[in-house]
Amino acid sequence: MPKAVYPASFDPIHYGHLDIIRRAAAIFDEVIVGVYDRPLKHLLFDVTERLALVREAVAAIPRVSVTAYGGLTVDFARENGAQVIVRGLRVVSDFELEWRMALTNKQLAPDLEMICLMTSREYAFLSASTVREVALLGGDVSGMVPPRTAQALAAKAAALSGDRQRETTVSLTD
Ligand code: ADP
């Protein structure tokens, strides 16, 4: 079976991503998880933090490696000798984005295939933005992310609430 890459921003990694990685690892000889360094969205974790959390989360899954990348995903796939780009599908709205990306990637790199795995039912609701929102509001994310990621989210939430308190104090004393 060919080699696959699974590219995402992983801000942060959650159980929906891990489910896709595990299932891809059962299909392909090798899965290279690509942590996209600069997505066009506001990030909670920088690339070093995201990379460390993904590495820790997949450490026990055989035939999976993790690396950060920038630029085009098709170039990342080719540089790593992959023939397949794996993505996950949760809801119908995911399909539109993935379809557009698949057609674009096909135009850029006709030799690569994009394969979408359907989410497992229990993760259909899960997205990194939901995880971030719940964690930053002080909610329990232990059922959504691996333990180390939950700790990192709690630390971020504490740091951000400290910053907000300092800003309020500064503006009140100005
Ligand atoms: P998120 O959508 O969680 O913010 P990304 O944008 O980094 O994460 O998503 C990267 C890939 O992982 C996409 O193909 C997306 O559909 C897939 N994915 C994200 N969450 C899930 C999930 N709960 N189940 C299956 N696939 C998912």
Image: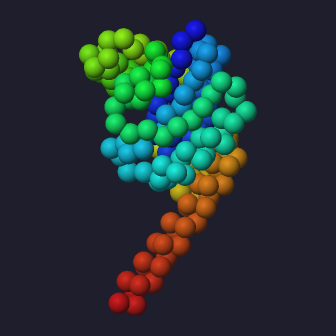
Q: In this view, does 68 lie to the left or right of 173?
A: right
Q: Total label count?
A: 0
Q: In which quarter of the image is residue 119?
A: top right
Which residue corresponds to the image point at 53% horizontal and 47% vertical from the top-left?
Answer: 50
| Res. 108 in view | yes
Which quadrant does the C terminus fall into? bottom left
User: Where's residue 99, x and y in %?
Assistant: 34, 18
User: Where's residue 158, x and y in %?
Assistant: 58, 66
Q: Is residue 125 above or below residue 52?
A: above
Which quadrant does the N terminus fall into? top right
Q: In this view, does 29 lie to the left or right of 85?
A: right
User: Where's residue 4, x and y in %?
Assistant: 52, 20
Which residue corresponds to the image point at 43% horizontal and 27% vertical from the top-left?
Answer: 79
| Res. 131 in view | no
Q: In the current view of this chain or complex, which residue is farthest to the right?
A: 60
Q: In this view, does 174 lie above or below 5?
A: below
User: Where's residue 168, x and y in %?
Assistant: 43, 79
Closest to the observer, 27 or 133: 27
Closest to the observer, 47 or 81: 81
**Colour pattern:** rainbow
Q: In the current view of this chain or complex, which residue is farthest to the bottom?
A: 173
Q: In which quarter of the image is residue 95?
A: top left
Which residue corresponds to the image point at 54% horizontal and 31% vertical from the top-left?
Answer: 33
Which residue corresponds to the image point at 61% horizontal and 55% vertical from the top-left?
Answer: 152
